[in-house]
Structure formats: C-alpha cells, structure tokens
Amino acid sequence: MSHAAVPSKRTAKPRWQRRKDARPEELVAAALEVFVERGYAGTALADVARRAGVTKGTIYLYFENKEALFKAVVRSTIVPVIAQGEALAQSFTGSARELLEQLVREYWQLVGETALAGIPKLMMAEAATFPELTRFYYDEVVARGHRLMAGVIERGIKNGEFRPVDVMLAAKLAMSPLMHAAVVRRAFASCMPEGFNVRAYLDTHIDLYLHGIAKQ
Amino acid sequence: MSHAAVPSKRTAKPRWQRRKDARPEELVAAALEVFVERGYAGTALADVARRAGVTKGTIYLYFENKEALFKAVVRSTIVPVIAQGEALAQSFTGSARELLEQLVREYWQLVGETALAGIPKLMMAEAATFPELTRFYYDEVVARGHRLMAGVIERGIKNGEFRPVDVMLAAKLAMSPLMHAAVVRRAFASCMPEGFNVRAYLDTHIDLYLHGIAKQ
Amino acid sequence: MSHAAVPSKRTAKPRWQRRKDARPEELVAAALEVFVERGYAGTALADVARRAGVTKGTIYLYFENKEALFKAVVRSTIVPVIAQGEALAQSFTGSARELLEQLVREYWQLVGETALAGIPKLMMAEAATFPELTRFYYDEVVARGHRLMAGVIERGIKNGEFRPVDVMLAAKLAMSPLMHAAVVRRAFASCMPEGFNVRAYLDTHIDLYLHGIAKQ
Amino acid sequence: MSHAAVPSKRTAKPRWQRRKDARPEELVAAALEVFVERGYAGTALADVARRAGVTKGTIYLYFENKEALFKAVVRSTIVPVIAQGEALAQSFTGSARELLEQLVREYWQLVGETALAGIPKLMMAEAATFPELTRFYYDEVVARGHRLMAGVIERGIKNGEFRPVDVMLAAKLAMSPLMHAAVVRRAFASCMPEGFNVRAYLDTHIDLYLHGIAKQ
DNA sequence: GATGAATGAGCCTTCATTCAT
DNA sequence: CATGAATGAAGGCTCATTCAT
C-alpha cells in the first residue's frame, strides 16, 4: 500500500501515537475551546477532534457521546475552582472583609481570566437543552458557590463587621458582577477596543460592596 | 390586529385576508419565543413558522435567511426599552437615588420579567457567531444603557448624594446584578423550586448599592 | 450558479418534480427491492432513495425513519395477501380440501412467486435485531395466516373430511413447506441450474398433506 | 479446557498459557453464537472477541476478515451433522418408516435444538452476499441431506411401505417443516410466550407425513 | 403572495480494519 | 502472540434553503 519508495528505517513518523492517559484531558481541553467558541449545538465533534489532533472516532473511545463530553468539560474544569475557594475559606483566619475580597479576586483569576469563563456562559446558553446537566451545575457550582460566599457574609455579620442582611441574597450580589463580567467581557471583547479594565472594575465592586454592607 | 378594521366595500369578502404588513412582526414575535427557548442553533425555522401560523417557505419572503431573522429579532425588540429609560431620566426631577431605584425597577419590569429577558442571554451566547450584530447590540443597547445609568450617577455625585467614583464602572455595577439575574433566572428556573425571590433580590441590591455609593 | 450557457425558455427540465401522492408508493416499491436484496441492516436508505429517483432527505418526508419504512413495506405488501386469503375463506362454499389447496396455490402465486417472498426471509434473518418489528410481523402476518389456515382445517374436521388433529399444528405444517420453499428458492437459485420445479413441489405437498390428513 | 492437564516439568509455570491451536475454534464457537443472534451485518466483531475472551485485533491473527470468519463458522459446524445422519442411514436395518422417523428426530436433536439451528437461518439470510459459500453449503449440506432422505424414501417405495412418489420432492417435504421450524422458532421466540411445542409439532408432522406417503 | 415538496450538506455515531506498542 | 488505541468510511437523520406549483 505504501507509495513511499524507500521507507526509512526509523525516522518515518507513525500515522498516530498511542496516548491513552493523556487523551481524555486533551480532548476535554479542545472541547472546552470549541464549545465556548461555538456553543453546544454549534460545535462539531470533528472540530474538537481536529483541534485535539485526532479523528472523530477517537472521541468515542473516551466519551460515550457529545453530551458526555460536554458534561466532562463542565465537571472537570469548574468544580475544582469551587473546591479551592472552600479550602481558602476554611483556612482563612483574617476578617470577613479581607476573605470576601480575596475570594472575589481569586475567583476572577481562576475563572474570569481564563478559558473557564466560557463555562458559565455556556451553561446559561444551553441550560434549557440539558436539564440534568443544568441541575448538576447548579448544585455543584452555583449553589455551592453561593453557600461559600454566604458563609463568609454570615461570619462578618456575627463578628459585627457587616450589617444584618439576607445572607444568601447578599452572597448572590457579591458574585453576580463577577459572573456577568466574565460573560460580557468575552462576548463584547471586540466591541471594547479600549478593553475592559477588570482591575478597576473589581476594585470598584469591592469598594461599593464593602461600603454597602459595612456596619456603618 | 383587528380584522374588522377596514371592511371592504365590495360584499364579496375574501376568505382570508393576509395582513402583508403585519407578517414580519408576527414572525419576529414567534422567532423571539423560539430563539429564547432553544438558542440560535437549536431553533428550527419550521418551529418558528408553525408558531407564526405559516409555513417554512414564507419566512424567506420576508427575511433573507435565519441569520437575518435573528438580527431582526434583536434589533426590533430591545432598543425601545432603552429609549424608554432615557425618556424617564430626562423628565425626572427627583433625587438621583430615587431615579436610580426607579430605573432599576423599571428595567426589571420591562425586561427581566418578560420574554425580552431572553435577548441578553441570546446575545451573550451567540455574540461570537454574529460580530456585526454584536456590535450593533453593544452600541445601541449595552453602551447606551451604561451611558444612561452613568448620567444618573454623575448627577448624584454632582449634587452631593454620591461619593465620587468612576461613573462608568459604577453604572455597570448597578446593572450587572439585574442582567445576571435575568439570565440566571431563566436558566435555572427548574433548579430552584422555591423560585427566585426577585423582589427581595432587587430590594437588597438597591439597599447595598445605595449604601455603598452614598456620601457617607 | 447555472453553468449552462443558454437556458432554454421552456424545455429545461426542473431539477425535481413534485409527486406527493405517488411518492410513498414509489418509495415502498424501491424499499422492497433493496430490503430484499440486502437485508434490513444492510440496506442504506441512500440506495432506496436513489432507486426511487429522489434524495435521502425525501424519504423522511414520508416515513419517520428506516423502521417505519420497513413496516410500511410489510403492511402494504404482505398484509393484503393475508386479507385476500381471509376473504377467500369466508366466501368459499366448496369442500375444505379444495379450499386448502386453493389457499396454498394462491399464496404461492402471490408471495412465493413474487418479490414478496423476500419479506419472510428478511424477517427471519433480522428478527432478533428488531424485536418490535418482529412482533409486528408476527401478529399481522404469521399468526393471522396460521389462524386462517387453522380455520380451514377445523372446518374439514367438523364436516368429516379430515381426521381429528391439532388444528394449529396442522395449519403450521400446511404452510411450512411453502414458507421454506419461498426462502430456499431465492437463496439457492444459483445453485440449482435446473431450477426448482415449484409446480411439482406444490402438487406433491398437497397430495401428501391431503392424503395424510384425510379421514381414511 | 483443563488447565491442569499438562503440568509443566519446570516449576516456573507461565502465568497464563495460550493454546494457540485452540484459538480458531474458540473464535468460531463465539462467532457462531453472535452471528446467529444478530445476523451477519448486525454482528460486531468486538462482541465476538469479547465472548471469546480476546480483543478485536486477535481475530485478525486467525482470520483475514469478517467474511472469512463467517465462512469458517459455516464450514466447520454444520457438515459433521450430515455425516452423522448418513452413517445412521447406512447401518440401519429396520423399516423405512422407522428410519425416516428416527432421522427426523435425530436431526432435530442435533440441529433444531442446538445453536446449530442458527446456521440454516444465517445461510438463507446471507446467501446472496456470499455466493461461493452458498454453493459450498448447498452442495455439502442441503443437497447431501436431500439425497440422504431421498434414499430412505426410495427404500420405502421399493419394499412396498410407501406409495410411488417423486423421491427428491418427497425428501424435501420431509425436511422442510424441520428446517422452517428451526428458523421460525428462534426468530419468533419472544412472540410466542406459550412457547413452541416442538415435540407435538414433530409428532404431528411425522404422523401426517407417514399417513400421507403410506401405501394405502 | 404562499405553499410545502425536494434538495443537499453536515452532523453524530458505529465499526471493520490497521498498526504502534 | 496479543493488545487496544486510532483510523476512516459509511449510515441514519436533521434542517436551512430553494423552487415548482
């Protein structure tokens, strides 16, 4: 079959490489990019495969189908971030103000600034299509994130740093500008040639928020 | 809408009368529903047609293709809301605090509460696919909305109600909890059986925000 | 798009014709051929479409999916044969012997001799893979055919023509040489250059069977 | 099958021992099951491999491709049965009636009752796809079987037990209810919850057939 | 203007076959 | 010998778009 006249003894590179262990992660990484760029329905698995350097069929060696791949992307990328936030909160010994600020900044660094920011966007866009996944995401990411932040605020109320407020609502309000910015920033990147000054945005949010919730 | 509006002089009335001029709007209205429910890629034009009471082919008499229909949906539904807000701001004579609160509540009533809330969600999901539309949306809706709100804040700073802050950032921060809630609420409706208490959420946001930005 | 330099005013034939009423039958006819030739699993709908002079997509305008198409083939080809046999049995006034013989010969003429003979073969080959289809075929064709024949035999027993035997078993035994011949004949056509003398085969079957079941 | 059969003299026994020579047979046995269950096209080689306790690739060490495996299944499983029948016929000393009955019952026991019953079904389903194999099967199984049975009938005619009939046709008619039952029984097993009473079916067939062919 | 039959490209998924290990 | 990761060619099905009626 080989038309190559003189196959070299050793240097001819194989048509493909066996990379069993690395493949799932490579595929998830490629899938994250494409899903975020094109949305779930708009994503062709052929694209994901190409970006991962394999062929379509290979995906099915590691994931049952497109939906399973999508779930793997969500699961393996975003959940760890929440866990990390929880760990920080538990080991933190300073004031509630400081912890809140640090969580906000850390979330931005881990999510807002990275490709992960696409996940919330994706989830919101595709929630209606994947009720089960949406439930998973809501429970494991959204609600957990809110509980984390609510705990911080409660701590602040108890030790007199914060005014008494509904902690769950306050938690959501601490996060929503971040979530929204993560989504908006990607969506309108090309519309804001001056860029979106995230640092200033975060600073202002923290400033307004902490002023707003402070005891007096 | 009224079938009786213009009775023809001739007694022989046509079996049905196609309101040629109403068609595009009917199609846009139907399309809004479906796009919001299913997303752009997930929307089948056959669905839109069925919901508008016509057949697939008819859509192409009024819109060049799916993309054109999508653009028409965005263009024709969301802009009026902003205009209404601007009118309110100009005629308003009370304090900046009161105006800000009223704009926030009005926006929620006009957008968050209605099918229009789907538009921001849609735009964020599909921004990458339609750069030109995104630019339009950003200029005519997002930026204009921000300018509107920035004007209010500036008014508040000038007359001593508010602390001096970056007005554009503060404007974004006044809106982002609303935008985010509009998106989240639809996406996770099924995950929050208790529902999302919007009134309390808005109250808390306004409370925290105004405390945060108040002069002292 | 048209590369044809000078499209004639009227004679240029359209790319396709609208043939709504005729299409289902044309598709079923084409499908019968291909299913019989290649088996159910081996049949590509593209082949069916090509043979019917349309494209793949057209099939789905008339049949929900491959299975529905297959059912339609069975329904519109084999089931009528059974119905015809039932009608004959009801209107028949002669002896049970004569009726049995006539049913056997008629079945052969309508099924064994025609392309329909491929259907039983198909069903037997693919039964395990498509349980629902099999159930449909069994109920609508096999069981119904057996009941028909059992009725005839019962008639013969009652009026003293036939010995008392288990009527369902006897019914199956009256049909099985036919069924088997229909299958075998197609399968081994190329192996029997002398051909398979069906007339003599049928004659002998009827002779042996009627001798076997006769009262004395 | 016994792992303990040939204890190696050396104490260092290999962790597992691959019986190179047994492999093809194991594969053929596994393939028989799957082919019969699912048909040729419906059979996934991965299934065959799994059932044989090896992996897909291994099949290709012993068989050129799927077709070759299929041929091996047919060739190696069915021929022995015919040979056994021939042996019985030659050594038999009783009446033709008794021999015919015994052959019928034996065939059922060896084929109808076992996995081998699937082979005729398979051959009929796939005859068109494998002409060469079909020729082989027809010559070595079908024709040989018919000749065997024809010899018995001829014996019966000669010694006055049977009426003079076309022996080849009568032979086919003696076998066809068996062949058909073997096929039907598997195909429609799930449709006959009451089961198919084979014993009664055979008894009735033998009864009707011998009555039908008896001298008077 | 309106219809809806027909097209054709594209997608997800399966699986026989190959080949690096 | 054996493995099983990877390939690549179909196949079923959907749907935006076209166009004869």
Image (cartoon, coloured by chain):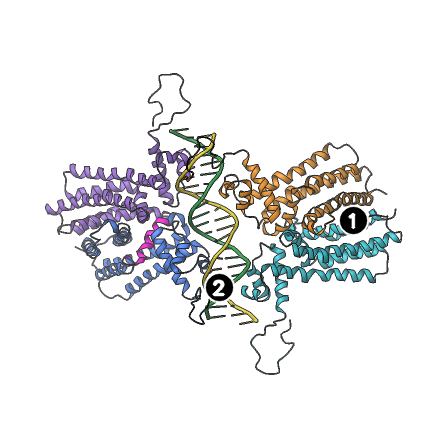
Chain colours: A blue, B purple, C orange, D cyan, E green, F yellow
Q: Determine whether D129 is above or below B17 in the image.
A: below
Q: Is residue C115 above or below residue A182?
A: above
Q: Which residue is mark 1?
A: D169
Q: Secondary structure at mark 1?
A: helix
- Identify the amino acid type marked 2: Ser
Q: Is residue C155 magenta?
A: no
Left or right placement of residue A117 versus residue D109 in this view: left
User: Does residue A141 sit above or below B7 in this rendering?
Assistant: below
The label number, if any, that marks residue A2 in the structure image? 2
Which region of the structure is painted magenta?
A: A112-126
Towards the viewer: C131 or D169:
D169
Q: How many numbered marks are there?
A: 2
Q: CA distance from mark 1 to mark 2?
A: 56 Å
Specify the quadrant that holds the C terminus of chain A: bottom left
- Kindly identify which chain the residue marked by label 1 belongs to: D
Rendering coords of residue B132 (x, y %): 28, 45
> Would you say D143 lies left or right of F18 here?
right
Residue B85, x across and y down, in percent? 21, 39
Judged from this view, the residue extending furthest toward the bottom is D10
SS state under label 2: loop
- Foreground residue among E20 and A3: A3
Question: Residue C151, labelled with which disc?
Answer: none
User: Residue A125 in magenta?
Assistant: yes
Letter of the chain that mark 2 sits on in the rendering = A
Q: Amino acid at mark 1?
A: Leu
Residue D2 appears left or right of B165: right
Residue A149 in the image: x percent, y percent?
Answer: 28, 57
